[in-house]
Image (cartoon, rainbow, N blue to C red):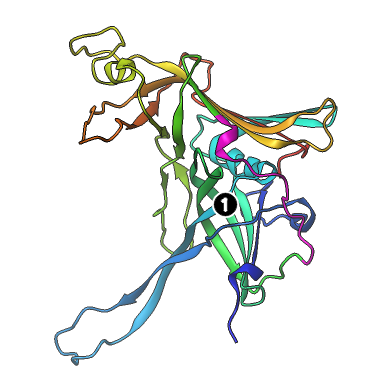
Amino acid sequence: MGFSSQAGQVGFMTQATPGVFPASFGTGAAFMKLRSGALGPNRDLLITDPEIGGGRDTVDAYLGAVSWSGDYEFYARLEAVTTLLKACLGSSSSATTTGVSTHTITPLDSATLPFVAIEEAIGGTLETMNYTDGVVNTFHMESDANGFLMGTAGVIARTGVAGATKTASPVWDNSPMIVGTNIAITLNAVTLPAKSFSIDINNNFEDDDFRLGSFVLGDLVAKSREISGSFTIRPVDSGLWRRAVLGTTAATTAGGLTTKDQLVITCSTYEDIVSGIPPTKGSITFTVPKTALEPFALEASADDVIENDISWRGVRPVAGTAALTAVVKSAKATIS
């Protein structure tokens, strides 16, 4: 018989109240098509150690406390991605003008980020779970020059309830996808001829806060946030190498300071937003005001063209400026 993975469905919605699965989930959630992924239990079977006076067999076993986590992998469609980005970063504002909605998403300094509720139907009728108090711990996007813009969201949830009733007619995000030929990167306002890129946000949530008398996590607290990424490039000169290794493009000996420039990654659809007047492309733009390059080597091998994978790290800019700003333009007026 068997169950096909493609028969499943996953939806996300920002929770208004911690611990409460939204009553309006069926009409308000963003249902995302996935490449793969599901949440699974983090739970131990508690087994006794051997006892003096006991037999050679295990005496008994109990189930311990449980949390839920997993990675969702997807092609980036902009209407659903905003929900995950808001959950990962924390703060958002939205404005709609002549059919084009602009969502600006920035990081919160608070260690408490928005909770997201998740409905996950596995295999169509195999099992349906409702997860409450979910957090987006990690968010990753990447593309190469001849591929699709893809993403991965690492999610942790406090509670999961099996046997839920799945949404009968989910509203899928069927908006256009993005490919590498429509992605541009600039560093200090200079276009980089990159062959690929990635961006990562890691909230480093503490996921082991179990307490006596309870099966679920007591809380989910975000620790130090990391904003990082990489790009692959064939250098046209040694400027990037000097900046990363010596400190500045003009340096000839090693210094202790780093050059920190603005990095902008712009990813656009080929299609116009259906409701937009005048015609406007859907897009997602990441702006990191201060970016430091990690040191790397200029490596030569036989007749290979020299090419480098360059990693970068976002650092905190001046007070009042976000360490990362994501701007999404789409047809959807609100963030689920």
Q: Report the residue marked by disc 1.
A: 74
Provide residue 109's location: percent of width, then percent of height.
50, 29
Closer to the camera, 216 or 181? 181
Q: Is residue 119 above or below residue 149?
A: below
The answer to which image quadrant residue 51 occupies is bottom left
Query: In terms of secondary structure, where does tag 1 sit?
Result: strand
- Give the overall secondary structure of the magenta segment: loop
Residue at the (55%, 61%) spot, across then down: 159
**Quadrant holding the C terminus:** top right
The reply, left or right, for residue 269 in relation to residue 243 is right
Q: Disc 1 marks which amino acid?
A: Phe
Closer to the camera, 224 or 31? 31
The reply, left or right, for residue 269 in relation to residue 65 is right
Q: Is residue 96 above or below residue 84?
A: above
Provide residue 236's location: percent of width, then percent of height.
36, 19
The residue lying furthest to the left in this view is: 52
Residue at the (53%, 55%) spot, across then down: 72
Q: Is residue 167 above or below residue 301?
A: below
The answer to which image quadrant residue 202 occupies is top left
Closer to the camera, 229 or 335? 229
Provide residue 21's location: percent of width, then percent of height.
67, 57
Count of numbered badges drawn on the protein: 1
Provide residue 285's location: percent of width, then percent of height.
59, 29
The answer to which image quadrant residue 315 occupies is top left
Q: Is residue 171 magenta?
A: yes
The residues colored magenta run 168-183
Residue at the (47%, 57%) spot, across then down: 217
